[in-house]
Image (spheres, rainbow, N blue to C red):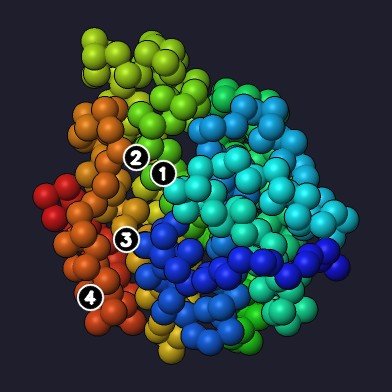
Amino acid sequence: MLTTRPSSTVFDPREALRLVSRTFALSIERLPGLLGDATMFAYLVFRVSDFLEDNESMPPERKVELLNLWVQILDGEVDVHELTAKLQDTDPNDPEAEVARQADAVLSAIGGLPEGIREIILEEARGSAMGMARWQARGPVVHDEEDLDDYMFEVAGRVGHMLTHLFAWYHEPLRKMSEELMPLACEFGLALQTVNVIRGMRKDFERGWIFVPESFCREVGINPPDLFRPENLEPAMEVVNRLATKAEGHLRNGLIYIKRIPRRYHWLRVACLWPLFFAVRTLAISRSNRMVLESEAKITRDEVKRIVMETQAMGWSNQWLDLYYDRLSRFEA
């Protein structure tokens, strides 16, 4: 059982959601009723873990300590205020830090959900936080593709599993498809995270992490830190394309996942399509553009709006989804 006390600060979860991720907020706010609320609180509890693992102000030792404390809290063994008290020195202007400081309010909201949903969220959040702590303890070294997949499973694949469990809890027919959907759900998570690795290569490097596998770099005769040296542009772009090919495989499986969702659950399909197609478009921009080695690649707001509008209208058609995927994956689209 979660050990919490009422928060003394008014916390608006919807506002927090929009501040930490406008794109995922678009999807979550389209989900119906209790499913939408549960997904919103689940997303925020994962963002607490993300902040503890990903912020630039803490040394790794403190991250490991706080992530392990967070695991104990999610297990119901420790009061959440032991964590929030340790976060009062974090950046007051950072929305992600604010979500972490309001972990008591997030867990209180999760505690009010039906037991089945609550257990799904806490189990996957606990597993993810444990995996993040393990990776922080071992340090910023990704030896090969298996290493990368292990890291990405902890931070994203588990999210795919959790969401699929929530979808199946809310829509009973999906429960019968769980065995079929779960591997694809993991692929969906790996797809989004692989694109994050590509578009965030420079930023990650500047904070001391390189998620590009060492084995990918050895194939072209360089070391991971050398990816960002101007004289290594050609081999570095070969590595980017190697990662992009990997991302493409995961993204295709993510699309299969969505197409397996019955068309009568249109808004569920659409909510999944948006992050997938945003990632497809981001990958198209990144894979042949040296910009990804210099700064973070992003799609434009106009492209986001277009994808939202077109998928709302046509996302029920699996044939159209295949054609639209191909169109977005072309750089000139």
For the residues labelled 1 and 2, say whether their Cβ atoms are less than 8 Å apart. Answer: yes
- Residue 54 at what x, y percent from top left? 54, 39
Say if 146 sits above or below 46 in the image.
above
In the image, 316: left or right of 128?
A: left
Q: What element carries label 4?
A: helix
Looking at the image, which residue is at 39% across and 45% down?
195
Whether residue 303 is visible, yes or no, is: yes
- CA gap, disc 1 to disc 4? 24 Å
Type of the residue with mark 4 = Met
Q: Distance between the residues labelled 2 and 3?
A: 15 Å
Residue neighbourhood size for the residue with mark 1, other residues' Cα within 10 Å, grouped as few (<14), some (14–19), many (≥20): some
Mark 1 or mark 3, earlier in chain: 1
Going from the N terminus, do you reach mark 2 or mark 3 first? Answer: 2
* Residue at the far front in the pictured view: 8
Name the mark nearer the viewer: 2 or 3: 2
Relative vertical location of residue 119 with respect to residue 275 in this rendering, above or below: below
Give the vertical position of 130 relative to 182 (above or below).
above
**Mark 4–mark 3 CB contact (< 8 Å):** no
> Circle 2 is placed at which residue position?
199
Q: Earlier in the sequence, mark 4 or mark 2?
A: 2
SS for callout 3: helix
Residue tagged 4? 309
Q: Give the spatial CA distance, label 4 vs label 2.
A: 24 Å
| Comparing labels 4 and 3, the label whose residue is closer to the camera | 4
Residue type, numbered disc 1: Asn
